[in-house]
Amino acid sequence: MLRGFYTAASGMLTQQRRQETLSNNLSNVTTPGYKADQGSVRSFPEMLIERMGSKSLPTSKNINLPVRSEVGPLSTGTYLQETTPDFTQGDIRNTGVSTDMALMNGNFPDENGSVFFTVRGQDGDPRYTRSGNFTVDGQGFLVSQSGAYVLDQQGNPVQTGGQEFTVSPEGVLQTEYGGTQLGISYTNDVYQLVKEGNDLFRYNDEGEGQAPVNARTAEGVTFGVKQNALEGSNVDPARTMTEMMSSYRLFETNQKVLKAYDQSMDKAVNEIGRVR
């Protein structure tokens, strides 16, 4: 009986966390370069239920030995194992703002490969982003919306000199002082990147994958950069709303199961065996 409580409660917790993930996705539907999170729901190990004493096996001394018969597996609940971003490209939309840049996927030699703008994190290490809504600070540096320096291909902050600039499809920022290659990084496995705040990703060096490299020198990698445009979020609002409704119904179902177990326990404690 108590196992039923745990199974239903774990189902409620799973759907609650799934709702939180979906709600966060929906709130970022207009965030440039946002990558939707996807939750992976897993089941706890199943238990084999057996019926005792339903059958007996006769022996030579006329003694019947009880035999167990299988009833079937019993699920012990579910849990949200992990949340991973969906790295499919969002729609490209024109903005007319010269500091806006959209990074467009080309050909990648690896199934899970992708390209990113490179910026400097607060700890000085590189971070990676698909959000290209940049701006120019008071010193003429190209920065992200959170103030992180956009890096060139040598790992230095991009300096515009406060001048007008253009960006070629190859990702070269051109001013009257010359051209600067924007830092475009390629990773052969996007799932080696860990999501941080402000639409940034960092490389997880605890894994066995390869750290992001210069996309221009990576063999077989092609990409494009479009100025005056932004890559939108890849969140599908209609699908997300449908999944939220489904998650809510599953939460509600587990809640009813929990209530039914509670009522059964109440009867077992207060009514069964009552002397009248």
Image (cartoon, helix red, strand yellow):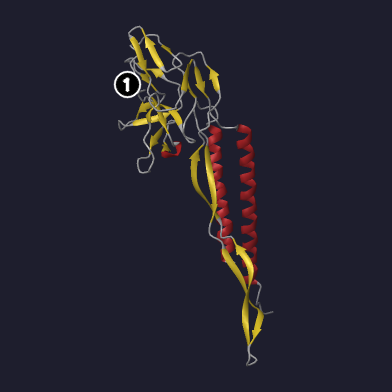
- Please identify the quarter of the rendering in which residue 54 is found: bottom right
Asked if residue 269 can be seen in this view, the reply is no
- Give the residue type at disc 1: Pro
Asked if residue 209 can be seen in this view, the reply is yes
What residue is pinned by disc 1? 157
Relative to 86, say whether 13 is above or below. Answer: below
The C terminus sits in image quarter: bottom right
Q: Residues within 10 Å of mark 1 (few under 14, many from 20)?
A: many
Relative to 209, say whether 166 is above or below. Answer: above
- Please identify the quarter of the rendering in which residue 136 is found: top left
Q: What is the count of numbered marks? A: 1
Residue 153: % across, % down: 34, 22
Residue 32: % across, % down: 50, 25
Frontmost residue, 264 versus 111? 111
Q: Residue at x 63, y 93 (%)?
A: 61
Q: Residue furthest front?
A: 219
The N terminus sits in image quarter: bottom right
Q: Residue furthest right?
A: 276
Residue 228: % across, % down: 49, 15
Left or right, 123 with respect to 257, comes to: left
Q: Residue furthest top?
A: 176
Q: Residue at x 65, y 47 (%)?
A: 249
Q: Residue at x 64, y 33 (%)?
A: 238
